[in-house]
Structures are given as structure tokens and as C-alpha cells.
Image: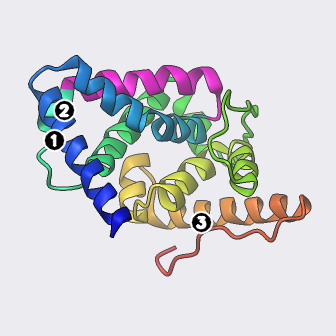
Amino acid sequence: MADGDAVNRGSDLESQWIYQAKQGSQHAFHHLYQSHHKRIYALCWRMLADKDSAEDVCQEVFVVLWQKITNFRGESKFSTWLHSVATNVILGHLRKQKNWLQRVFSIEEQVSNVVEPSEKLTDNSTLESLDKHIARLPERARLVFVLFAVEGYRHEEIASMLKMAVGSSKSQYHRARTLLKEWLEIEGYDAVTPESGDA
């Protein structure tokens, strides 16, 4: 019961911060930033595989959040809505990059440079290793894997976001999963990456 009460208190507190931020309170917005920054940075780093870009885009996400927080109606969890905002900002950043189409839709292997995050994204060594390997994936496979396995989007949604066929999204997910499994097994882990009947 104590844990449940703590969760409820935390949820109530966040609701107050959201309400106050909508009224223009920078202090309340700072609390929201502190509460969600680490996970948003992790999402940025997983999708961009570059520390500097992840830091810049993470800050951009919160600038956009400040501008759009009045649009949050409470019809979903705030964290879910924020991650949708973040995903759109990240994809927008990628589309602005030179050679976006060639980079994302190339049939050739394009492995990004691996840049270690400046802080641990998790205390779990297996997940740290998974993050490192996610950054090694070819970009299209990495984006699909993060959106499907980490963020929980359906392949139909991913296909729409990335302007690809649903079948391509599924094949890229399986490609990413196969590569990650191989890399983790080389390191001695019993690789377990998300399965789904929808995959």
C-alpha cells in the first residue's frame, strides 16, 4: 500500500507541475524537466547514436514542450505524450540532416560511429551493453527497433513516421533484433530482445 500511495502522490505532484507550467510557471516546468530529462536523453541517444546531437535535440524537445504543454489534455499519460513529442522532434531533426533519404533508406549497411553516453543510462550492465549495440545498428534498423521495441509504437505507425512500407518496418525490426542478439551473445549474454506477435 505504501508504494501505491507514493506513486499516487508522485502522480498528483506531477499533475500540479503540469497545471502550473501551463500557467507559465518556469519553476514547475523545471520540475518536469528534472523528472523526464534522463529518459528523453536516452531516447535521443538511442535514435541518433551521437552524444552531441542527442544533447542538442534533447534540449530542443524541452523547448518544444514548453511551447506546446498547453496542448496536453490528459487523455494519455504525460510521459506517453511527451515521448510522442520527443519522437517527432527527433525525426524532424533527422530529416533536416543532409542526405536524409540516402542515409535512412539506403540498402547499404551504414553503421553509425558509436559514441558512449556521458552518463550511464541504466544501472543494468546488460541494458548498457544493449544501448551500445543499438548505436551500431544501420540507421533505418536502429530507428525501427527503438520505436517498436523501446517506445512501443506499432509497425503501422512506424511505417507512417518513416515513410516506408509496413513490411519494411517489420523486416528492419527483425534485422536489428538478429544483429543485437548476435552481438550480445558474442559478449556472453543470453540475448533477449523484445518479441511480439505483431512483429
Does residue 147 belong to the magenta stretch?
no
Disc 2 element: helix
> Dot 1, crowdedness within 10 Å: few (<14), some or many (≥20)?
some
Q: Amino acid at mark 3?
A: Ser
On screen, residue 101 versus residue 174, left or right, reads left
**Rendering quarter of residue 106:** top right
> Dot 3, crowdedness within 10 Å: few (<14), some or many (≥20)?
some
Rendered view: 88 above or below 98: below
Give me the C-alpha separation between circle 1 and circle 3. 34 Å
User: CB of mark 1 within 8 Å of CB of mark 2?
Assistant: yes
Question: Which residue is at a point 59% across and 66% down the rendered structure image?
Answer: 171
The x and y percentages for residue 172 are 60, 60
On screen, residue 70 versus residue 161, left or right, reads left
Mark 2 sits on what residue? 69
Q: Earlier in the sequence, mark 2 or mark 3?
A: 2
Does residue 57 belong to the magenta stretch?
yes
Quadrant (top left, top right, bottom left, bottom right) of the N terminus? bottom left
Give me the C-alpha separation between circle 2 and circle 3. 36 Å
Q: Amino acid at mark 2?
A: Ile
Question: Which residue is at a point 67% across and 38% down the rendered structure image?
Answer: 120
Mark 3 sits on what residue? 171
